[in-house]
Amino acid sequence: MLIHFWGVRGSLPSPLTGDQIQAKISAAIARMSPKDARDEDSKMRFLSSLPDWIYGTAGGNTPCVELKASDGNSFLLDCGSGIRMMAKYGVQPKDSVYNIFLSHFHWDHIQGLPFFDPIFRPASKINVYSVYPDMEFYVSGQSSLPYFPENACYPAMRERFSFHLLDEDSEISIGNVKIRCHKMTHPGGSCAFRFTENGRSVVYCTDAELQGSDFDETAANSAFFSDTDVIIIDSQYTSTEAVSKEYWGHSAYSTAIDFAERWKVRNLYMFHYDPTYDDRKLDSMLRAGIVYQKYNSDSSTKIYLAKEGQEIQV
């Protein structure tokens, strides 16, 4: 499977501000020496040597992750503002079939759907999967008057949509991919998804305030989380901020690391970042997480920041 991150930010879109861009430029200039500007090769070597928080960005679009299976099937996980970028720059799946898995219906996870170009194309088929029976009601209510012009409202595209209700901790198959769902703790509810193909597995676990029970050795927990190749997991807060925001439905990066270690996950991608955290703070979270892991366990879990535009082969 191939993972592509189209949106990784939580709560609301947070594009770079002019001040943040200027700060990145200033930080780069401060590191530059005359030899770094001798020729184009020198400039490129200098730029590639810069820390990621200066030369790149985690991105400001809200959650949308694409999984591409080896058999050509494609899966879109949530419809935050990142899904618009997928429509613009992504590859159209085979037979124009879009399989959308919605973790829940908070605004940052559905706000991009009315701007997803394929829903306006007659040849598209949009399959929506959720554990929530009222999914069509939520989707249709979002794209309705007076929020959108009449020709862009849900009735104009209804024939392209199919809705599929999932049972928690049961398994379905789409092509070669087996999919399970598992409810997590979040205000109003949220659902994690596990995708398995050819012995490789990816768990998408956003908007989850991890509880002690999530660490318990139950049959459901073990079947869903253990021995996972990649987990994309809610890491919205620093440890300090998570304490002050208990019951908000999100986790600290350190709790996410503990959780990945508990279930012997091989690769952890922090995800659903707080919209107030800039790239430098996210970089410091990553470095702190690596140190935290080093001194608190002998885990071999590798820790990364999910970044918009990033692709990972599983």
Image (cartoon, helix red, strand yellow):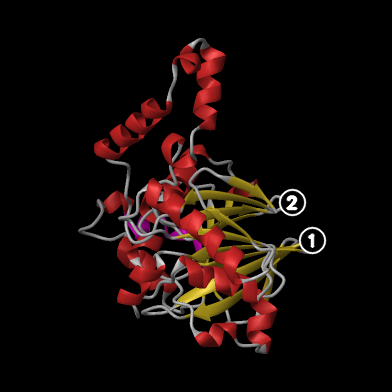
In the shown orientation, is residue 158 left or right of residue 290? left
Q: Which residue is mark 1?
A: 198
Q: Which is nearer the eye, 17 or 51?
A: 51
Q: Which is nearer the eye, 55 or 247?
A: 55
Q: Quadrant of residue 310?
A: top right
Q: Of the residues under marks 2 and 1, which one precedes in the sequence?
A: 2
State the SS at label 2: loop
Q: CA distance from mark 2 to mark 1?
A: 9 Å
Locate residue 226, reporting x and y percent. 69, 75
Placement of 153 over or under 139, stated as above or below: above
Quadrant of the frame with the C terminus = bottom right
Q: Quadrant of residue 296?
A: bottom right
Residue 160 part of the magenta-drawn span: yes
Q: Quadrant of residue 194?
A: bottom right
Locate residue 241, reporting x and y percent. 34, 69
Q: Residue at x 42, y 37 (%)?
A: 54
Structural crowding at the residue carrying mark 2, measured as other residues with C-alpha within 10 Å and reported as few (<14), some (14–19) or many (≥20): some
Q: Amino acid at mark 2?
A: Ser
Check the image and name the residue furthest to the right.
198
Q: Which residue is mark 2?
A: 70
Inspect this view and state whether residue 164 appears.
Answer: no
Which residues make up the magenta segment? 153-163
In the shown orientation, is residue 34 left or right of residue 293? left
Placement of 122 over or under 227, stated as above or below: above
Asked if the residue under mark 1 is in contact with the one under mark 2, i.e. CB atoms within 8 Å, the reply is yes
Inspect this view and state whether residue 62 appears.
Answer: yes
Q: Which is nearer the eye, 60 or 299?
A: 299
